[in-house]
Amino acid sequence: MKRFLSLRPAQQLAGATTSTRAQRLASAPFLRALLLGGLAVLGTAGTALAQDAPAVKAKQADAQCLSFTVENPKLEKVRMDVLCLSHNTFLMSEVNRQASYGSKLNFAGVPAGKYAVLLRVGRERYRYNVQVQKGEQTTISVPELMPAQAPAAIASVTR
């Protein structure tokens, strides 16, 4: 037997002696339990979905290097491209499908200028803008990340 639950007020039957207020009070614990159960199910579904989503962490390891870690539980295609924006050229392109992937990019040997690190995990896309400055020592700055002393920052996602 199928039951269809709705949150409309109970209808009073002809000849019934129970008041409407008493009916509402009698059904309140049932509705409360139903709502709490529904919220619990939705909360667990959200947690399960969050566990399957790729986790991308990036940090500036030192003055010249940028490190990436990708947790990819669904084994989706991971693609990393490094572009020189000044000359519109690819410096590196890499593809893999591992459950856990890491890469460390060293910008010491590249000319000063603007670069973009494009990371794609399945349908998720991440972009990091890297400014390389030359002097006594090559230094990079990545506006999307915290300073090198801070823990790893989580990238912003664009869909």
Image: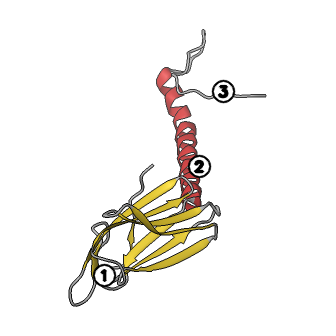
Extreme residue in the left direction: 135
Identified at 55% across, 48% down, the residue is 42
Mark 3, other Cα within 10 Å: few <14 / some 14–19 / many ≥20: few
Residue 33: x, y in percent?
56, 44
Question: Which numbered tag is attached to residue 41?
Answer: 2
Q: Is residue 156 left or right of residue 146?
A: right
Residue 84: x, y in percent?
36, 66
Image quadrant occupied by the N terminus? top right
Rendered view: 13 above or below 28: above
Question: Which numbered tag is attached to residue 10?
Answer: none
Question: Which numbered tag is attached to residue 4?
Answer: 3
**Nearest-to-viewer mark from 3 and 1:** 1
SS state under label 1: loop
Q: Amino acid at mark 3?
A: Phe
Kindly check if marks 2 and 3 are in contact, taking CB atoms under 8 A apart as contact.
no
**Nearest-to-viewer mark from 1 and 2:** 1
Identified at 20% across, 85% down, the residue is 135
Identified at 56% across, 74% down, the residue is 101
How is the protein colored in the picture? Answer: secondary structure
Q: Is residue 113 left or right of residue 118?
A: left
SS state under label 2: helix
Q: Amino acid at mark 2?
A: Val
Q: Which residue is mark 1?
A: 148
Residue 94: x, y in percent?
55, 69
Front-lying residue, 131 or 143: 131
Separation of marks 1 and 2 at Cα, in angstroms: 40 Å
Which comes sooner in the sequence, label 1 or label 2?
A: 2
Extreme residue in the right direction: 1
Which comes sooner in the sequence, label 3 or label 1?
A: 3
Quarter of the image where one finds residue 82: bottom left
Which comes sooner in the sequence, label 2 or label 3?
A: 3
Q: Amino acid at mark 1?
A: Ala
